[in-house]
Image: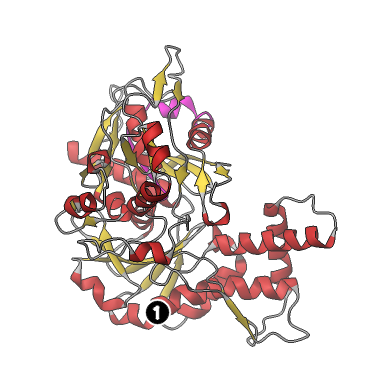
Amino acid sequence: MDATTNHPQPYTLGIDLGTTSIKIVIVDSAGGVVENVTVPSLANVTSIVGEDGAEQCPVAIWNALHAGLKQIDPDNQVKVQTIGISGQMHGLLLWKQGKSWERGNDQMRHIILRNLSHLYTWQDRRCSKEFLTTLPKPDSRLRVAPGYGCVTYLWLLHNQRQMLATEQYDCVGTVMDFVVAAICDLALPVTSDQLAASFGYFNVESRTWNTDILKSCGFPVNVLPEVRKAGQVAGHLLQGLEHIPAGTPVLCAMGDMQCGVLSGAQDRSDATLNISTSIQLSVRVDDILSGRLMGEAVEVVPYFDNFHLAVVAGLNGGNVLMSLASLVKHWLQELGLPQDILETALLEKLSSLGQKSPSDSTLKICPTVFGERHDPDLLASAEGISAHNASLGAMFRAASEGIVDNIFRLLPPEVLASNGLKRVVGSGSVLRNPLVLKRTQEILAGKLEFVQGTESDAALGAAKAGLAFLQQQQ
């Protein structure tokens, strides 16, 4: 819809609730970026299960979202006519129907949160391989793995049942589903087929939960959200959001991977590579079976408009490099040396050293410190170490290159090319690492064209999904 004197140009708002940051973008009716902002979420909390746990405070995520919205020009906010929200998939959040948020009466539409569990993120590893073997096989072409919402809930049923009984949580979903429920004041949670597939025990073909299977192991299926197709409306803002008007439609929460593809891929011959905290290499396919030709590490998940994505979702991306920075800081502590440096600053120093370090084809690091979904017990390894090539810079270079080597080992460029792909569109914060970027270009050279995509990533895709909804209403 074009702008007129009576009807100002409509904007759409895209939000991505990432693992480490919140991204917000506003686009115009042509899909152009009007304004965007990124704020750190600073949400990580200590888990009672120690290093196997990966938990975040949902209130911290909520506060970071509002801090980001306050940086967006109010004049742009009032033009927003639909909202799309994406974010970190697979994780689990529990809340109480009608008791987890309370609305204030002030002009800022303040909402107070309470009666929430921690967010158990996709990085959570409390569900061991042994525990997974005790669970029933899902009625789905998709595997289940540690960090998946249904799997984590089943672990809580077995190991922290008293917590579930005491708190009396009666709704579950991703953190994005909760945000949608809170701002729209939904009585029951609603999610998209994209996020339901990431939760586990969801049949992609029938778009239904495996209710009988879940009931057989004591899962209270009434807590699961209603599932709608990605791109459909979940509800409307009850009191507005900052300066965004009340009544604005809000789409069902979507997957960050799918929204990242939507923001970057131009046509059917594009594959998309996103390297952020984790890493995904995705290809749009017509149906579930067509994606199975690409390898055992490939899974096929819902996309938009009845299409699917064949994807390798690697667990080892920027988190590997941050882990290396944490390890160096730990070494300093063990040596009794000064360590009053933030890990993010240490990461920048390591990156600088890595760029100065000469390339060494003998030193290689397989960076799978977090395993992979198709092989959770996979460990990292290093080879080709000599007395002269094990500097910090060389190790950082090898780890950066290993991240890229690993994802293309799971889905080689030759396989992509043989399936009709011509380009790889890259995005994500870690592709700003020159070592990662150069390695990507080297691997694809002569096989597929590499294109550096947008930096807005999933937030932009979420906004574009909102724009598509507006266009359908015309």
Foreground residue among 388 and 149 = 149
Give above or below for 127 relative to 446: above
Q: Residue furthest top?
A: 105
Residue that label 1 marks? 413
The amino acid sitting under disc 1 is Pro
Task: Give the extent of the magenta segment.
Answer: 69-89
Tag count: 1
Residue 99's x, y, as percent? Answer: 36, 24
Q: Is residue 80 left or right of residue 419?
A: right
Name the residue at 17% across, 52% down.
212
Query: Taking 39 as reference, is 283 above or below it?
Result: below
Say which of 326 and 467 sits in front.
Answer: 326
Q: Quadrant of residue 33?
A: top left
Relative placement, left or right, of 385 versus 178 is: right
Return the residue found at the far left: 206
Position in image of residue 165 (x %, y %) = 36, 35
Q: Position of residue 367 (x, y in %)?
A: 56, 72
- Mark 1 residue element: helix
Q: Is residue 399 above or below residue 125?
A: below
Residue 87 colored magenta?
Answer: yes
Is residue 428 part of the magenta span, yes or no? Answer: no
Figure coloring: secondary structure
Residue at x 85% of width, y 58% of height: 336
Residue 186: % across, % down: 28, 28
